[in-house]
Amino acid sequence: MSLFARPLPHWIAIIVFFASAQLVAAQSQEEAIVQAAASILQETMASPLNAIPQSMLADSHGVAIIPNVLKAGFIVGARHGRGLLFVREANGNWHAPVFISLTGGNIGWQVGVQSSDIVLVFRTPRSVQGILSGRLTIGADVAAAAGPVGRQGAVATDGQLQAEIFSYSRSRGLFAGVSIDGSVLRIDQLATGAFYRSPGPNQPVVVPPSALQLTQAIARYTGTAAAVANAATQNTSIVQQNRTNESDVLRAQLVQIAPELFDLVSPEWSNFLALPSSLYLSTEHPTAESLQITIDRFNTVASDPKFVQLAGRPEFQSVHALLKHYRQSLSASSSTLQLPPPPPIVEILP
């Protein structure tokens, strides 16, 4: 299903609320994921006898690190986690990571374990492309196996050698291979878009220092000094292709639900309430000013008792709310409000 699958009108407010709530705090949340992934990689590779064999990493086409995958249920249940996917080019250079989610049953979990850190090593280009295409089901789309650790890397079994993904888990300080068949991996485009910001229209995204350092750490374990130097500095094409933002989501929602409103009214009303033509004719977002013209017309209808029959319709209210939210998302705003000094604090004596 498309990321922008058409919702029912009464779900619009819920979708906008959750998308906005996620994006407001997203960058700090995603930064926490990056920091956790960096700690997992460092601690995992610190013990040569109980770590992912470096020979396995050297031949990998991608690496995923998913901190704190939570388990619910007993013996048979569910798990969910959010993490990072690093993709390697044929020349050995690594791309800046994109954000991913993992969901699925808890086959292979130890009883009583509530959370685990998951590391996946992708051994073939096909396994990486599977997730970049939108969704990958481990065990169905590609074969996976519990990865060997330490010296076992040199004596992997035939069954393991047939696997396209090696999977590892760290729980309670112990690190070992784990089976996660049935788990589904997806690209998290909203999280990727929230974490990577562009300095201006049509300009490449900026890789935050934490992601750059972690990509370089991946390169140190898997490549050469040149790969470390090139890691993430120029390789942001996968990020560009797999990111979206609040404005993109709201634009898609508007284009999809507006026809439901226009189907209710006459051509004259459709012309009066028409959305900016650039929504349909261009890949660029309309200006905030052009959106405000449309919003003013919706405001006029909403405030006039003569049009209460139209203004009370959920289709009208959904489009009206999305327009205002969309305009706000396109308007440049300072991260800190410029306010006068606060009023004095009046102490109340006991």
Image (cartoon, grey):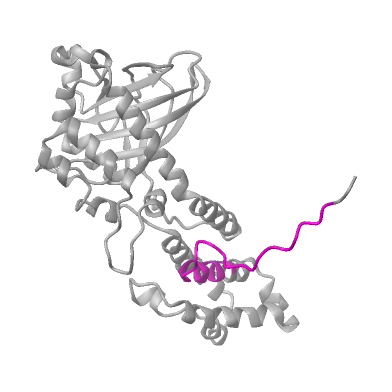
Inspect this view and state whether residue 274 appears: yes
Q: Position of residue 259 (x, y in %)?
A: 50, 71
Is residue 169 placed above or below 222 in the rendered structure? above
Question: Would residue 299 be found to the left or right of residue 135 on screen?
Answer: right
Give the dominant element type of the magenta stretch: helix, strand or loop: loop
**Residue 278 position by quadrant:** bottom left
Q: Please state the horizontal and vertical placement of residue 342, each as a whole percent of the image.
A: 69, 63
Where's the C terminus, which quadrant? top right
Q: Residue at x 57, y 65 (%)?
A: 337
Residue 137 in the figure: left or right of residue 233: right
Count the marks: how many? 0
Left or right: 134, with 67 as reference point: left
Q: Is residue 232 left or right of residue 11?
A: left
Of residues 321 and 234, which is closer to you in this image? 234
Return the residue found at the far bottom.
Answer: 268
Find out whether residue 161 is within the magenta segment.
Answer: no
Residue 343 part of the magenta-drawn span: yes
Question: Is 24 located above or below residue 152 in the figure?
Answer: below
- Of 222 and 322, nearer the camera is 222
Q: Nearer the viewer, residue 216 or 124?
A: 216
Could you tell me which residue is drawn at 64 percent across and 66 percent down? 314
Give the residue at x 36% y 27%. Answer: 118
Q: Position of residue 14 (x, y in %)?
A: 59, 54
* Segment colored magenta: 321-347
Question: Furthest-right residue in view?
Answer: 350
Query: Residue 32, located in which quarter of the rendered image?
Result: top left
Q: Where 202 falls versus 57 (above or below)?
A: below
> Please, is residue 76 above or below residue 244 in the view?
above
* Residue 127 visible in the displayed image: no
Where is residue 92 drawn, in percent x and y?
A: 12, 40
Residue at x-position 73% and y-position 84% = 306
